[in-house]
Image (cartoon, rainbow, N blue to C red):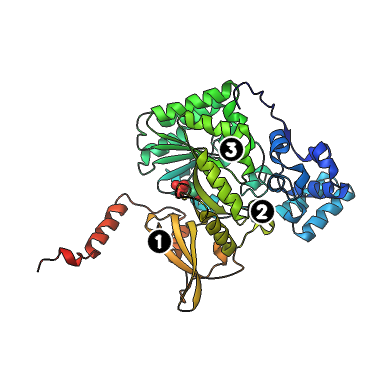
Amino acid sequence: MTKTTPVRKFQVYGKPHIDKLPQLQKLSEEQRLAMKTVAEVLPFRANNYVVEELIDWDNIPDDPMFQLTFPQQGMLKEEDFETMRGMMLRGADAKEMKPEIKRIQYGLNPHPAGQKSLNVPHENGEPVPGMQHKYRETVLFFPMAGQTCHAYCTYCFRWPQFVGLDDMKFASKEASGLVEYLKAHKEVTSVLITGGDPMIMRTSLLRQYVEPLLGPGLEHVTSIRFGTKAPAYWPYRFTHGEDSDDLMRLLGEIRAAGKEAAIMAHFSVKRELETDVAQYAIKRLISAGATVRTQAPLIRHVNDNADNWAQMWRLQVKLGAIPYYMFIERDTGARGYFEVPLWRAYMIFTEAFRQVTGLARTVRGPSMSCTPGKVLIDGITEVNGEKLFVLKMLQARDPAWVNQVFFAKYDQRAGWMDQLKPAFGEKEFFYAEGMRDMRKTGEGRVWLPTEVDALEETWRMESVEPDHHKKD
Ligand SMILES: *Cc1c(COP(=O)(O)O)cnc(C)c1O
């Protein structure tokens, strides 16, 4: 692929297109009604690139890209699905359907992991709009205009904002609040601009958020990351048009300011990396000076097989991208449909990990983004006859918890942290008391600048001189 390849014109598909898309006409009326029924409750958005290049229409409904982007009957509980379908069949009006839709949506745990209450920092008693600060080194920033995507993933944990359950007031119109916050918080070394998908914005708009981060007083911010699925869902964002050239310049400016420009690219399925235009997008990003790191959640019906991950990671490394995280899907939305039990997630990760060289073993997972932090399932083992999950905190609200190993009773059915019980007769996990304190104060972060030094001091005092250093 080169610049002379004609660019596709972006066409977005939503609910009304379920009856119109020619590719869907081979489905039965019944199947299309099921899709429309689910699309009343959960967000649906696809586009012409996804439909024409990524989905294998000879393999529906099983095709992973179809499962990733199109609504499926199993995503709603049977009784909820029947209620909605009944209304659709008798042509119920919006006024009648709305309360039912809301009831079902609120039953899908729309706000997991304390996103609202604990993650938003306060400055002078006021919440800082458009920001989350959960882990000491990294601030998340949500620009107002970046709160949608080129297509929606059916399992997306941000689904509530796409169906109007959340307003966009949490997002920010400008970077000034962010800059002020960062100037006052020298512990922050990384800003992660996320959404939605910030790459949905024109570069000129994106620039308004990025440029202020390159100025004086923010030397401690050494990386700017962009969380995006555009390389998978709309790679033309990076390859064609004046706007893509401008983006490459912006990435170059971040590099010139001495900071890392990191594209945190969401790739779920190998197919997303196989098109010429996707590979060209990665190439251009890297040529512009950005690093491309890849991540995705593990989703039943989409990517719950080890070979897909091994092939993805290998191809990513070949293209110059760096495998970063494999996540467990969050405890929200159509979770019953997508859930992979923790034991199986660990097996899939391990089987894939075994197939790749160390160059791809930069990936960590499977990892759960829980209220206290990111929890890695690091092993399944047995100690004194008790079968256990070995867990490790990769990221935490309290930096003192990071890299701590802990144990949970093995549970074949568990799919999320809240279903795990501490092993060895412990009453609660090691972070429980700290979490209670944070909930009491409403302050979801507890670090002090001196903490690292204090910890190192403890180690020094505890360390014992090795024998061969002793003089006799
Ligand atoms: C994952 C995550 C980050 C970034 O963590 P890294 O391990 O540095 O990639 C920051 N904030 C939140 C809320 C996260 O979930």
10 Å neighbourhood of mark 3: few (<14), some, or many (≥20)? many
The quarter in which the C terminus is drawn is bottom left
Could you say whether the residue bearing mark 3 is in a helix, strand or loop? loop
Instruction: Please give left or right for residue 223 compared with residue 162 in the image.
Output: left
Q: Which residue is mark 2?
A: 333
Question: Residue at position x 39%, y 42% from top?
Answer: 188
10 Å neighbourhood of mark 1: few (<14), some, or many (≥20)? some
Q: CA distance from mark 2 to mark 3?
A: 19 Å
Could you say whether the residue bearing mark 2 is in a helix, strand or loop? loop
182 or 54: which is nearer to us? Answer: 54
Question: Which residue type does callout 2 highlight?
Answer: Gly
Instruction: Please give left or right for residue 161 compared with residue 431 in the image.
Output: right
State the image quarter where residue 413 is shown.
bottom right
Q: Which residue is mark 1?
A: 404
Find out whether the residues at labels 2 and 1 contact each other: C-beta distance under 8 Å: no
Instruction: Give the x, y percent position of residue 310.
Output: 56, 50
Question: Residue at position x 72%, y 48% from top?
Answer: 63
320 or 238: which is nearer to us? Answer: 320
Instruction: From the image, state whether disc 2 or disc 1 is nearer to you.
Output: 1
Q: Earlier in the sequence, mark 2 or mark 3?
A: 3
Q: Which residue is mark 3?
A: 197
Seen in the picture, residue 222 relative to 76 is either above or below; the reply is above
The answer to whether residue 148 shows anywhere in this view is no
The quarter in which the N terminus is drawn is top right
112 or 309: which is nearer to us? Answer: 309
Q: CA distance from mark 3 to mark 1?
A: 32 Å
Seen in the picture, residue 342 relative to 384 is either above or below; the reply is above
